[in-house]
């Protein structure tokens, strides 16, 4: 009986989920008319050379080859095992080659195929759509009853291609997905272009010229962030009227979550103020072509109006504070730390003496947190020194105001780092990352304090405060930066704004007041930043989250799943219980008071 009830509950849950995701599933399951791969003929031209690796439907590789040859292209057939020795081709075609492989083998084959594409060439891919795997890897594992999960998992394995890989996540930095289209039952075709050069040089130049928010360095292509693979952070570079003239870029993560392909934009577009709308339109056009829906996870007020004009909701997410370095004065306690530090065996250094020790400390810090892994939404892992001669040297005086790529220091050396040692052992470190005036001068406006990481239960307990105070003193002595920004305080001081979603704003305000510290340290983070400001802080920017209003309810759930990665997801039920137990009595009290005021008003009207 219990098993039957369990199964019935699972079936009802499945039906509800299928109804919720009906739009996404319709795009995957409904045939798209004529085979989309026939659109590839526009890539075939006389004299071009194509390499074809094919599996799947009977005769499909030969059909594609005939299509190419009819347009004047020459076609070479190959086996996946021989791909590593192949020359470069104008076009490389993979037909169902990745579907049956384990993820490591599929990734290796995908990377080899990308390497065989000549600059300006294209990789054409036909295979299983990744969205079913994105839905079911979470739902089937834990959300449904075991009998239902086993049945569906077995059924899906019998589908053509089984649970598909998301091959787009393995595309190297110098390649860009240009188009994606569904093809019948759980399949898709993808077109991936190799660029003439990787976008890193353009990104670094534009970041120094126009990156005027404290999160700008999060978009750096050369930040050497621990725990972030090179393929994770993607870029869309927008061009102006003149072809090849880059006017701005958008940095984003692309993931398939609960049936939808999302492009999670990590901050404002990096461009001149006059080019914001053009950069956004260019990015949205590409997102539409690859069937990905954008969510702007943390943008400033200067982007709100252009996003609203393009049909996005813009709901306030939180605020940011910082300290004006020219006027900031250390309090009495912090001045005392400087005097007491030598007797406690404490010292700070701009150089890390052992990078292995630094990685071990960072890993210990990560494991001590609720998520147990690095979080790459609203914050980023630290930018560590590069290994090699001179990589960890003090960058002071290296001239951050270079502006152009040729006269600026490497991105690694833009970061201000201080490493705290106690009796010769590394116990913590801080990282401050630069942002610029944004007027094209390349001059530093301030630094964003992205990282404060220390071992737990240190003695003396003020070791981290001492290190941050030393960083403030270092920046004041340099005299180049105006602000030290402390980054986003999520859900802090959220208020109604034009173009927001009232229900989402109310949910954000409720999460702030509930103070669910065991899931995400919201109020604790804001208090720590206020502590470092020492009543001398200034409000820098309000931050907003933006998305398509129609998809906002489900996209909010998807966004929370990405934010609460790993073990934190399973703390949500406990957080909901706490939310109900703490907020329902408060809400009931407000309702009771409102009713009392209403009756008093009615009594006053009747008798007077």
Image: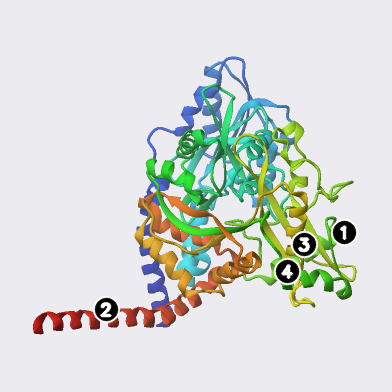
Q: Quadrant of residue 249?
A: top right
Measured in 3D between alpha carbons, the distance from the residue under mark 2 to the one under mark 1, in whole angstroms, is 63 Å
Provide residue 63's location: percent of width, then percent of height. Answer: 51, 28
Dot 2 crowding, Cα within 10 Å, few <14, some 14–19, many 20+: few
Kindly identify which residue carries mark 3.
Answer: 470
- The relative height of residue 340 versus residue 268 in the rendered view (above or below) is below
* Residue 85 placement, left or right of 564: right
Closer mark to the observer between disc 2 and disc 3: 3
Q: Earlier in the sequence, mark 2 or mark 3?
A: 3
Measured in 3D between alpha carbons, the distance from the residue under mark 3 to the one under mark 4, in whole angstroms, is 9 Å
Could you say which is closer to the camera, residue 233 or residue 405?
405
**Secondary structure under the numbered disc 3 in the rendered image:** helix
Q: Earlier in the sequence, mark 4 or mark 1?
A: 1
Q: Are marks 4 and 1 in contact (CB under 8 Å)?
A: no
Provide residue 347's location: percent of width, then percent of height. Answer: 85, 66
Kindly identify which residue carries mark 1.
Answer: 354
Kindly identify which residue carries mark 2.
Answer: 594
Q: Are marks 3 and 1 in contact (CB under 8 Å)?
A: no
Q: Earlier in the sequence, mark 2 or mark 1?
A: 1
Q: Earlier in the sequence, mark 3 or mark 1?
A: 1
Could you say which is closer to the camera, residue 206 or residue 503?
206
Quadrant, the N terminus: bottom left
* Count of numbered labels shown in the rendering: 4
Measured in 3D between alpha carbons, the distance from the residue under mark 4 to the one under mark 2, in whole angstroms, is 46 Å
**Secondary structure under the numbered disc 4 in the rendered image:** helix
Provide residue 45's location: percent of width, then percent of height. Answer: 56, 18
Dot 3 crowding, Cα within 10 Å, few <14, some 14–19, many 20+: many
Q: Which mark is residue 465?
A: 4
**Secondary structure under the numbered disc 2 in the rendered image:** helix
Q: Are marks 2 and 1 in contact (CB under 8 Å)?
A: no
Q: Earlier in the sequence, mark 3 or mark 4?
A: 4
């Amino acid at each position: 009986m219990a098993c039957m009830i369990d199964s019935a509950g699972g079936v009802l849950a499945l039906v509800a989920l299928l109804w919720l995701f009906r739009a996404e599933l319709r795009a995957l399951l409904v045939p798209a008319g004529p085979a989309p791969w026939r659109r590839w003929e526009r890539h075939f031209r006389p004299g071009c050379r194509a390499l074809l690796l094919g599996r799947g439907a009977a005769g499909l590789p030969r059909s594609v080859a005939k299509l190419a040859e009819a347009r004047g292209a020459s076609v070479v057939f190959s086996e996946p095992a021989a791909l590593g020795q192949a020359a470069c081709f104008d076009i490389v075609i993979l037909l169902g080659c990745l579907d049956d492989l384990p993820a490591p083998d599929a990734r290796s084959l995908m990377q080899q195929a990308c390497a065989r594409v000549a600059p300006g060439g294209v990789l054409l891919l036909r295979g299983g759509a990744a969205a079913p795997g994105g839905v079911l890897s979470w739902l089937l594992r834990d959300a449904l009853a075991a009998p239902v999960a086993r049945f569906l998992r077995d059924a899906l394995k019998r589908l053509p291609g089984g649970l598909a890989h998301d091959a787009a996540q393995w595309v190297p930095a110098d390649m860009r997905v240009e188009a994606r289209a569904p093809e019948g039952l759980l399949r898709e075709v993808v077109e991936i272009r190799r660029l003439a050069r990787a976008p890193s040089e353009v990104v670094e130049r534009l970041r120094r010229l126009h990156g005027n928010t404290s999160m700008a360095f999060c978009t750096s292509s050369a930040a050497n962030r621990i725990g972030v693979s090179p393929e994770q952070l993607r870029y869309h570079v927008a061009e102006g009227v003149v072809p090849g003239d880059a006017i701005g870029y958008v940095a984003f993560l692309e993931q398939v979550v609960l049936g939808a392909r999302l492009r999670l934009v990590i901050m404002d577009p990096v461009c001149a103020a006059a080019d914001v709308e053009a950069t956004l339109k260019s990015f949205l056009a590409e997102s539409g072509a690859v069937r990905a829906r954008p969510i702007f996870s943390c943008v400033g007020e200067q982007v709100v109006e252009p996003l609203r004009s393009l049909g996005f909701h813009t709901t306030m997410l939180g605020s940011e504070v910082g300290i004006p370095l020219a006027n900031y004065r250390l309090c009495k306690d912090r001045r005392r730390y400087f005097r007491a530090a030598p007797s406690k065996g404490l010292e700070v250094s701009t150089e890390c003496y052992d990078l292995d020790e630094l990685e071990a400390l960072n890993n210990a810090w990560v494991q001590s947190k609720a998520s147990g892994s690095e979080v790459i939404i609203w914050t980023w892992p630290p930018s560590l020194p590069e290994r090699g001669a001179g990589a960890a040297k003090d960058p002071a005086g290296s001239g951050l105001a270079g502006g152009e790529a040729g006269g600026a220091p490497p991105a690694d050396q833009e970061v201000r780092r201080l490493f705290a040692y106690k009796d010769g052992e590394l116990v913590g470190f801080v990282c401050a990352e630069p942002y610029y005036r944004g007027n094209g001068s390349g001059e530093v406006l301030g630094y964003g304090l992205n990282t404060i990481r220390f071992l737990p239960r240190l003695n003396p307990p003020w070791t981290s405060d001492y290190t941050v105070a030393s960083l403030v003193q270092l920046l004041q002595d340099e005299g180049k930066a105006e602000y030290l920004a402390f980054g986003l305080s999520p859900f802090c001081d959220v208020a109604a704004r034009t173009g927001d979603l009232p229900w989402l704003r109310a949910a954000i305000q409720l999460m702030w007041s509930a103070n669910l510290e065991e899931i995400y340290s919201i109020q604790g983070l804001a208090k720590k930043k206020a502590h470092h400001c020492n009543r001398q802080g200034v409000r820098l920017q309000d931050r907003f989250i933006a998305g398509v209003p129609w998809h906002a309810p489900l996209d909010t759930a998807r966004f929370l799943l990405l934010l609460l990665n790993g073990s934190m997801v399973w703390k949500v039920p406990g957080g909901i219980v706490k939310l109900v137990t703490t907020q329902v009595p408060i809400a009931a009290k407000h309702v009771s008071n409102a009713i009392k005021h209403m009756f008093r008003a009615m009594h006053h009207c009747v008798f007077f």
